């Protein structure tokens, strides 16, 4: 058994209606002036107002920055940091999907720092201590509320990951009520993102461990048992709660064990073609998993027990094939486009995307259970063009 270190969020609260406790929780962190970080969609849902009401009821000054954008461009993150400084915030709340949560982490880290975002690209490059931070996810989901990574889109229009233990929050507050209004496309895309987190963590070549395996398996079991329910009926609070918890477990798993080729190939789709992150993963997951099959058959067979608990298989090969086939059927059934060309990608775009993947995103590719070279990345993109 390999030696390992496992890190996770100090406190996760799963409570339907828990947003109403925001003021109480921020008071417990000694905060007097809190800024809520969200996007326009979340503000339009009224969640920003509800967060402010809870903070003010606890005697905490509150402001809202509602200009977050998907795949957060660094210039928007800088604007959010400036807004927090202007408000003299001493606490930060991320409220929304991964784009808002990733922005909030960096705001908490940079408000009282002289570092520039570009100095943080990579691992453990942040200096100083962040402000108190509470993360409230509204998608299920990226799991960003329990990870120490933020993913931004650089000024050179490339996705960059920033890793620091400082990006873990003081509290992750999971309130399933906030996920009820997610549109079916967002529900499906974010759910598939979470499932890929669990699967890629479980098959990670370099950093999987007994804890990440347990979290990945339970996360995948919850996500697989409830994705069709929440896509079909977004008002199903029980299924929504299970998805949010499954997404959190998958987040804890992948940030310790890492993700791999599905994420590496999805990044250019988000940065260049603005394909939503979960949908980017869904577009490439099947050909990547089939590419991995020769070395990941046993792992996929083990995961088949989580995804297809009522099925029995005569061999690992049969179970692994059923696992990948189930994921393919799932992706085809949740209402998302399944071809890159439907998202504006052309064959001419593939070589440059493949170069970005094999040169710039080697960190994730190196965790793939099977080595993947430039030509193989090209072939995978072409398989779903
Ligand atoms: N840091 C991490 O650990 C991590 C992990 C995975 C992905 N990510 C990043 O997260 C981002 C994607 O996040 P996402 O997929 O959650 O989407 P998102 O945050 O970009 O939000 C997508 C859309 O859904 C809307 N929305 C979100 N919740 C809603 C709700 N409850 N009701 C109605 N509308 C709602 C938003 O307003 C937005 O328009 C990407 O930038 C990706 O790189 C980060
Ligand atoms: C290791 C985590 C890198 C970010 C994954 C979600 O995009």
Image (spheres, rainbow, N blue to C red):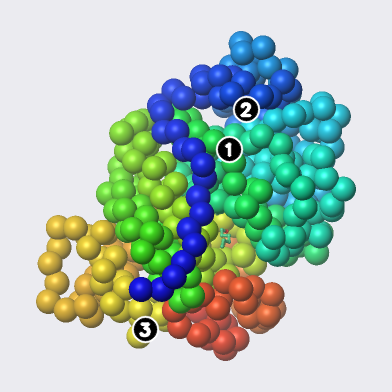
Q: In which quarter of the image is residue 238?
A: top left
Dot label at residue 170: 1
Dot label at residue 29: 2
Mark sitting earlier along the chain (1/2): 2
Residue for point 37% across, 83% down: 295
Where is 220 relative to 48, above or below? below
Q: Where is residue 83 in the image (x, y as percent from the top left)?
A: 82, 33
Residue for point 32% across, 38% down: 239
Taking depth in this image into account, of 55 and 323 the one nearest to the observer is 55
Q: What element carries label 2?
A: loop
Q: In which quarter of the image is residue 111?
A: top right
Give the spatial CA distance, label 1 vs label 2: 8 Å
Q: What element carries label 1?
A: loop
Residues at circles 1 and 2 in contact by the CB criterion of under 8 Å: yes
Q: Is residue 191 visible?
A: no
Which quadrant, please, contains the N terminus? bottom left
Dot label at residue 252: none
Q: What element carries label 3?
A: helix
Taking depth in this image into account, of 92 and 38 the one nearest to the observer is 92
Quickly name the residue at label 3. 295
Where is 284 relative to 297, above or below? above
Q: Position of residue 199 (x, y in %)?
A: 39, 64
Q: In which quarter of the image is residue 187?
A: top left
Taking depth in this image into account, of 267 and 170 the one nearest to the observer is 170
Give the spatial CA distance, label 1 vs label 3: 39 Å
Give the spatial CA distance, label 3 vs label 2: 47 Å
- Which of discs 1 and 3 lies nearer the camera? The answer is 1
Mark sitting earlier along the chain (3/2): 2
- Which of discs 3 and 2 lies nearer the camera? The answer is 2
Q: Residues within 10 Å of mark 2 (few under 14, many from 20)?
A: some
């Amino acid at each position: 058994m390999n030696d390992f270190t496992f890190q996770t969020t100090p406190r996760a609260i799963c409570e339907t209606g828990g947003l109403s406790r925001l003021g109480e929780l921020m008071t417990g962190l000694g905060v007097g002036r809190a800024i809520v970080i969200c996007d326009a969609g979340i503000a339009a849902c009224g969640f920003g107002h509800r967060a402010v009401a809870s903070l003010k009821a606890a005697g905490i000054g509150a402001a809202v920055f509602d200009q977050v954008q998907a795949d957060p461009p660094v210039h928007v993150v800088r604007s959010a940091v400036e807004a927090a400084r202007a408000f003299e915030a001493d606490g930060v709340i991320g409220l929304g999907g991964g784009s808002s949560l990733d922005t909030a982490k960096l705001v908490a880290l940079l408000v009282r720092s002289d570092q520039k975002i570009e100095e943080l690209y990579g691992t453990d490059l942040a200096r100083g201590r962040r402000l108190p931070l509470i993360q409230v996810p509204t998608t299920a989901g990226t799991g960003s509320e329990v990870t120490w990574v933020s993913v931004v889109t650089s000024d050179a229009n490339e996705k960059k990951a920033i890793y620091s233990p400082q990006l873990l929050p003081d509290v992750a507050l999971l309130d399933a009520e906030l996920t009820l209004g997610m549109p079916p496309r967002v529900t499906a895309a974010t759910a598939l993102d979470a499932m890929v987190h669990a699967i890629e963590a479980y098959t990670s070549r370099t950093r999987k461990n007994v804890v990440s395996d347990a979290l990945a398996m339970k996360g995948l079991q919850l996500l697989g048992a409830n994705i069709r329910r929440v896509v079909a009926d977004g008002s199903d609070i029980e299924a929504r709660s299970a998805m949010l918890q499954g997404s959190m477990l998958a987040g804890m798993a992948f940030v310790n064990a890492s993700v791999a080729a599905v994420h590496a190939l999805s990044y250019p789709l988000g940065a260049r073609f603005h394909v939503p992150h979960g949908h980017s993963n869904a577009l490439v997951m099947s050909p990547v998993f089939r590419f991995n099959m020769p070395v990941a058959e046993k792992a996929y067979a083990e995961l088949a027990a989580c995804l297809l608990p009522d099925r029995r298989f005569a061999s690992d090969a049969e179970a692994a094939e059923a696992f990948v086939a189930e994921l393919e059927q799932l992706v085809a059934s949740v209402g998302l486009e399944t071809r890159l060309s439907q998202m504006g990608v052309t064959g001419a775009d593939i070589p440059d995307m493949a170069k970005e993947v094999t040169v710039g995103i080697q960190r994730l590719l190196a965790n793939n259970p099977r080595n993947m070279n430039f030509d193989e990345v090209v072939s995978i993109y072409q398989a779903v063009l």
